[in-house]
Image (cartoon, rainbow, N blue to C red):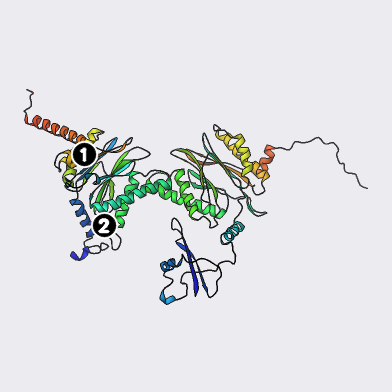
């Protein structure tokens, strides 16, 4: 006799459809699962019809030989999950929203690129930042841009930052636990003024006025929080954002490259600057020519 | 012709969807309903057929609210109406959940019309036998709107419209007498349109007024009677003015 266990998980918005694990152990037991409550589910699949006696028609794959069934999956995801090696920040102030990010991509200790665009333009009045998996962020931001445009066409009005961030958060929630790595901020200007939301791949969504995401975020927060005032001018806010990114790149090995600063105002976003952080370092801390105590002189021929 | 009204997914040779047209017939047999849009208020009115003595009239509510700022009245099959209204109410809340904003009147009208259209293009189902008049205020701009949908799934915005029994006469009346009104004037216009086809009196008319501040308010029978009396008085005064010869020399 075989033990047949069918576990099927149905995702909230049905995007993936049914994805099921089917364990058909003929003769021997791989795992001691209590399947008494699961027998009725078999008939839903139609797998246990008279013609296919003992065979599974649904796709099946073997389960790992481990006792910690739930924990195993977490470990695997952690292994594959790219550590969010980056620094991005955004804050709301009197004139709008300031968004800034570095541009380094790292794979462990290897710097794979110094010129990654981490601020993604969703549409002319909304920006998203990238932290985590680059492909995940780029794809889902692009997808969000499509959804925002469709909303505009259907409803003859722009989508709010609230609505856009909620759409993204709902999508990410439906993929929860499947290894997406996205830590993004959605910044924009809508009818209610400036808006800033933090959305991540765990399905979290937070409304706020100051956020920094990534491995360099503690350093960025230090500078940002101490220099922040609501009534900054645009230039002051840009300088604050730039300095915060610079300081994060100085101390965090996974951040570097170019500090880009974008401003989102009532007429949409505008890129303000993109400065190499090495040059910023010497701008903030220029090398003072020090007086020479002893000078080496070349000895003429021996 | 008779062969083309079984499965509704089939067109007739001359391009008709007979099931949809039969559904419109069902609407024409339903009770008269009218909607009028004013500058700051929208009014819905519906004919109330006399209730049987043993029936609890409070359970027969024809004008329903879909959300705080949207109301609906329909003419046609009441059971279909219940199903459609429930789906629309769920969609209103679902929209609030996914985009954290209330629906606009146009959005929910589009949804209801889309639902009605879906049932004209599916196998084994018949169309909803009702037309709806949907009123409400845009949550952002505060502008009042009135929309109508029908069993085919078409919808459009109106300044004033009528559906159900004798809707043509009501619409003719509205076309002749419509002007931009506000507040009580809009209510009077709606009642006058209904009185064209309905026996006069508060017992036979149900009126609801929606304002931006207070949402939907059903008028009491006494209130309606008072307005009806006003209208009759005005009518009588107009009659005598017409009959009496002009006094100028």
Give me the C-alpha separation between circle 1 and circle 2.
29 Å
Residue B225's tag is none
Locate residue B178, reporting x and y percent: 21, 38
Q: How many marks?
A: 2
Q: Which residue is the extreme one toward the top?
A: B249
Relative to residue B229, is residue B245 drawn left or right? left
Q: Could you say which is closer to the camera, residue A215 or residue B241?
A: A215
SS for tag 2? Answer: loop
> Circle 2: is it few (<14), some (14-19), or many (20+) Cα within 10 Å?
many
Sequence order check: which comes first, mark 1 or mark 2?
2
- Whole-percent x and y of residue A115? 61, 50
The chain carrying label 2 is B
Residue A283 point in image, percent of width and height: 67, 38
Can I make out residue B111 in this image?
A: no
Camera-side residue of A210 and B155: A210
Do pointers 1 and 2 mark residues of a single chain? yes
Residue lying at 44% horizontally and 61% vertically, measured from the top left: A17
Does residue B164 lie above or below B222 as drawn?
below
- Determine which residue is flagged by label 1: B190
Give the left or right position of residue B99, taking residue B28 as reference. Answer: right
Badge 1: residue crowd in 10 Å (few <14, some 14–19, many ≥20):
many
User: Looking at the image, which residue is at 86% across and 41% down?
Assistant: A296
Q: Residue at x 46, y 47 (%)?
A: A166
Residue A226 can be seen, yes or no: yes
In the foreground, A299 or A123: A123
- Residue B156 lies left or right of residue B29; in this view the side is right
Give the structural element (helix, strand or loop) at label 1.
helix
In the drawing, does residue B93 fall left or right of residue A26? left
The residue where tag 2 is placed is: B127
Please tell me which residue lies in front, A196 or B159: A196
Report x, y in % for residue B74.
24, 48
């Amino acid at each position: 006799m075989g033990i047949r266990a069918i576990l099927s998980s149905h995702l909230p918005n049905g995007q993936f459809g049914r994805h099921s694990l089917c364990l058909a152990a003929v003769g021997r037991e791989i795992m001691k699962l209590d399947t008494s409550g699961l027998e009725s589910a078999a008939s839903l699949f139609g797998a246990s019809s008279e013609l296919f006696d003992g065979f599974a028609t649904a796709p099946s794959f073997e389960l790992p030989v481990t006792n910690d069934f739930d924990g195993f999956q977490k470990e695997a995801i952690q292994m594959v999950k790219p550590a969010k090696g980056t620094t991005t920040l955004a804050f709301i102030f009197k004139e709008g929203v300031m968004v800034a990010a570095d541009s380094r991509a790292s794979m462990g200790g290897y710097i794979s690129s110094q010129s990654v665009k981490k601020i993604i333009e969703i549409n002319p009045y909304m920006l998203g930042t990238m932290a985590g998996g680059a492909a995940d962020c780029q794809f889902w931001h692009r997808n969000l841009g499509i959804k925002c445009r469709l909303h505009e066409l259907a409803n003859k009005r722009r989508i709010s930052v609230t609505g856009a961030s909620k759409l993204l958060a709902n999508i990410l929630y439906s993929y929860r636990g499947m290894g997406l790595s996205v830590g993004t901020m959605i910044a924009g200007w809508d009818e209610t003024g400036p808006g800033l939301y933090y959305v991540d791949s765990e399905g979290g969504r937070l409304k706020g006025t100051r956020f920094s995401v990534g491995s360099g975020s503690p350093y960025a927060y230090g500078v940002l929080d101490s220099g922040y005032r609501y009534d900054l001018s645009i230039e002051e806010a840009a300088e604050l954002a730039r300095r915060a990114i610079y300081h994060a790149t100085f101390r965090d090995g996974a951040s570097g490259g170019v500090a880009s600063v974008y401003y989102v105002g009532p007429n949409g976003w505008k890129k303000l600057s993109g400065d190499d952080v090495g040059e910023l370092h010497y701008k903030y801390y220029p090398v003072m020519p020090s007086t020479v105590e002893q000078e080496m002189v070349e000895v003429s021929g021996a | 012709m008779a062969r083309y009204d079984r499965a509704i997914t089939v067109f007739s040779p001359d391009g008709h969807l007979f099931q949809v047209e039969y559904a419109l017939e069902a609407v024409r047999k339903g009770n008269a309903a009218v909607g009028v849009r004013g500058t700051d208020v929208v009014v819905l009115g519906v004919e109330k057929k006399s209730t049987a003595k043993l029936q609890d009239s409070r359970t027969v509510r024809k004008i329903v609210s879909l959300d705080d700022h949207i109301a609906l009245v329909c003419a046609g099959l009441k059971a279909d109406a219940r199903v459609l209204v429930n789906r629309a109410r769920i969609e209103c809340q679902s929209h609030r959940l996914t985009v954290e904003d209330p629906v606009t009147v146009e959005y929910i009208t589009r949804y209801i019309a889309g639902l009605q259209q879906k049932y004209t293009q599916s196998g084994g189902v018949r169309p909803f036998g009702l037309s709806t008049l949907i009123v409400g205020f845009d949550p952002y701009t505060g502008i009042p709107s009135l929309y109508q949908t029908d069993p085919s799934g078409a919808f459009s915005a109106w300044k004033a419209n009528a559906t159900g029994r004798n809707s043509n006469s009501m619409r003719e009346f509205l076309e002749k007498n419509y002007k931009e009104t506000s507040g009580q004037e809009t209510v009077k216009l709606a009642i006058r349109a209904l009185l064209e086809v309905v026996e006069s009196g508060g017992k036979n008319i149900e009126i609801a007024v929606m304002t931006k501040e207070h949402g939907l308010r059903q008028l009491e029978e006494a209130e309606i009677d008072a307005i009806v009396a006003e209208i009759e008085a005005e009518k009588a005064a107009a009659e005598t003015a017409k009959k009496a010869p002009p006094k100028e020399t």
